Image (tube, rainbow, N blue to C red):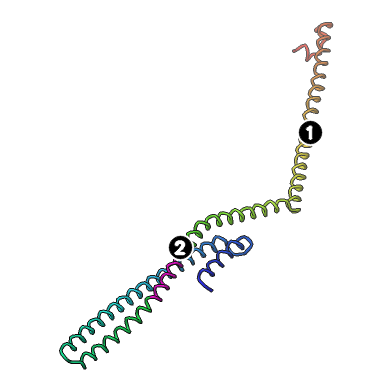
Amino acid sequence: MGLFDRISRLIRATINDLVGRSEDPEKILNQTVTDMEDDLIRLRQSVAQAIATQKRTQRQASQSKSVSEEWYRRAELALQKGDESLAREALARRKSYMETANALDGQLQQQDGVVAQMKDNMRKLESKLSEAKTKKDMYIARARSAKASQQLNEMLGGVGTGTSTAAFERMEDRVNQMEAEAGAIAELNSGGDLESKFAELEQGGDIDDELANMKARISGSDPARLPSDERNL
């Protein structure tokens, strides 16, 4: 599986399965971005190594061409001096370096294609990473909202269960019972006060009647006829 196929697979899996899967969506998204950043670092290192290899090949090719040209001048010099054998040997050396230069030129063409493709892949990965970072915050916010909604719905569902309803009914009965008991106690206390008031009224009436009789006896009778204890008053 290629690099971009793996990245695309990770992104699709993250988008399609975030809420429905048991994994933490925020953790998955952060890990996905981290993996992409690591891939980009490795790709940049590979591109740098490929470019370094390309430059080294270029230097080797240029050097081989320069040496081949030098052997060509030596062949000319040997021929001018009449040493055909030495000129032939110099041309053989020139041919060897020319073959090396041509081989290096072929490698350079291949390396040019590889480096160009790697740079293109690096730019695509940079774009994918930038897009992933932008979308990550949005998906994390959506995942958090979905999780909060799920928790809220679970809480509301728990409040509506038979156990909770029965508990409220028991508490309502208990409060009603307490209110009834308090009312009964207040009524009993009120009744006792009423009895006390009537008892005071009845007692006070006897004293008033006795006082009235006493006044009548005093006003209509001789003080000498009053009881001895009343005369002494």
Number of residues whose C-alpha sits closer than 10 Å to that of mark 1, classed few (under 14), some (14–19) or many (20 or more): few
Q: In x, y percent, where is residue 232?
A: 75, 12
Residue 213 position (above or below residue 74): above
Which residues are drawn in magenta? 109-124
Residue 158 position (above or below residue 89): above
Q: In x, y percent, where is residue 6?
A: 53, 70
Q: What residue type is labelled 1?
A: Glu
Disc 2 is placed on an element classified as: helix
Q: Which of 141 and 133 is in front in this view?
A: 133
Q: Which of 123 and 150 is in front in this view?
A: 123
Q: Is the magenta stretch mostly helix, strand or loop?
A: helix
Q: In which quarter of the image is residue 139?
A: bottom right
**Residue linked to disc 1:** 187
**Residue linked to disc 2:** 126
- Give the residue at the far left of this rendering: 81
Whether residue 204 is in magenta: the answer is no
Disc 1 is placed on an element classified as: helix
> Residue placed at 70% from the left, 53% from the top?
157
Q: What residue type is labelled 2?
A: Glu
Q: In which quarter of the image is residue 228?
A: top right
Whether residue 113 is in magenta: the answer is yes
